[in-house]
Amino acid sequence: MDLGLTDKVVVVTGGASGIGRATVEAFTRVGARAIALDRDPEALARLAAETDGVETRELDVTSAADVDAAIDAVVERHGRIDVAVNNAGISRGLGWFHDTDESHWDAVIDVNLKGIWLCMRAELRHMYARRAGVIVNTASAAGLRGAPGVAHYVASKHGVIGLTRTAALEYAPLGIRINAIAPGTVDTAMSDSFAEARRADPFADALVRQPHPLRAAAAADEVADGILYLAGDLSTFVTGSVLSVDGGFTAQ
Ligand SMILES: NC(=O)c1ccc[n+]([C@@H]2O[C@H](COP(=O)([O-])OP(=O)(O)OC[C@H]3O[C@@H](n4cnc5c(N)ncnc54)[C@H](O)[C@@H]3O)[C@@H](O)[C@H]2O)c1
């Protein structure tokens, strides 16, 4: 099936690991020109060594200067950005609301919310000029529901959905589509660190344990498939939406 993504210029933040890496590989398989943007130079080098045809570039999504420079550099080299997947995200800490560390709040909001806003702002400057483009933001099931033990993460992901819907409304008249994907638990480094925190603290484990009806966790590829759908020609009338890829979690 042709998703209309051949030769498209695609940037993926957090592209060196987990969902981002699976997304970069999926775009490459369908013939797109994928550029992985990430703050981890070693993971980027591994990706470049293991995947043919992938371009990589280091950036920190919390730095406006970094983000603007990276997006401008991609446009200078390739002439445009057709698809932007804003996916870089972190989790920090797990426990009672009243015990939440301020540094954890700041770090999570900075990467997960401000980072997405900075990336969208830089991408939309170019997409606005061309009156073309597609954006997919990685939110979470935690952007649609409360999740005990991770209020800062939940706040950041609700914010991502708010940014997605608002920008979708602003840019729909120009034909620019902006959607979010909302995974449940996905088998990645992030969910590993989460599982470790749960093991270290049985109380925290009890706070967050809630099963996904289909099975325990998604593979990163299953989320990448949803991102491909939102980026390509199968979703030309879809904007401002949140696609749940969560094994039925939010249906409960
Ligand atoms: N794993 C899950 O269960 C799950 C569930 C729902 C949503 N998500 C979301 O999916 C996205 C990807 O998570 P993942 O599970 O693949 O995690 P991951 O840790 O495997 O990958 C995240 C990537 O983002 C990069 N990154 C982190 N901070 C960055 C920054 N400031 N600038 C640039 N790059 C940065 C990391 O270096 C890493 O390569 C995140 O937004 C996360 O919140 C994950």
Image: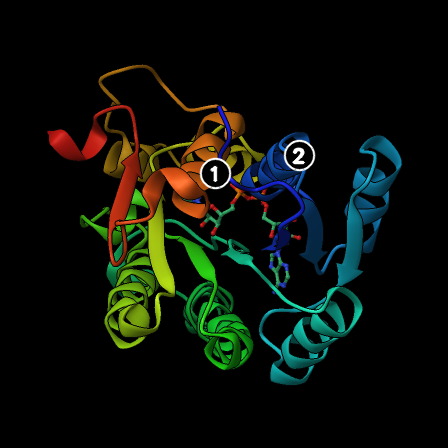
Which corner quadrant of the image does residue 207 belong to? top left
- The residue tagged with tag 1: helix, strand or loop? helix
* Left or right: where 9 falls relative to 240: right
- Give the x, y percent position of residue 193: 54, 39
- Alpha carbon distance from label 2 to label 1: 11 Å
Image point 42% across, 24% down: which residue? Answer: 218
Vertical placement of 18 versus 123: above or below?
above
**Amino acid type, mark 1:** Leu
* Left or right: where 41 falls relative to 119: right
- Give the x, y percent position of residue 228: 48, 38
Image point 42% across, 35% down: which residue? Answer: 198
Quarter of the image with the C terminus in it = top left
**Amino acid type, mark 2:** Glu
Q: Considering depth in this image, is 5 or 27 the residue closer to the camera?
A: 5
- Mark 2, Cα crowd under 10 Å, few <14 / some 14-19 / many 20+, is many
Q: Name the residue that disc number 2 marks.
A: 25
* Comparing labels 2 and 1, the label whose residue is closer to the camera: 1
Is the Cβ of the residue at disc 2 closer than 8 Å to that at disc 1?
no
Image point 65% across, 41% down: which residue? Answer: 17
What label sits on residue 228 in the rendered view? 1
Q: Extreme left residue here?
A: 252
Residue 116 seen in the figure? yes
What label sits on residue 153 in the rendered view? none
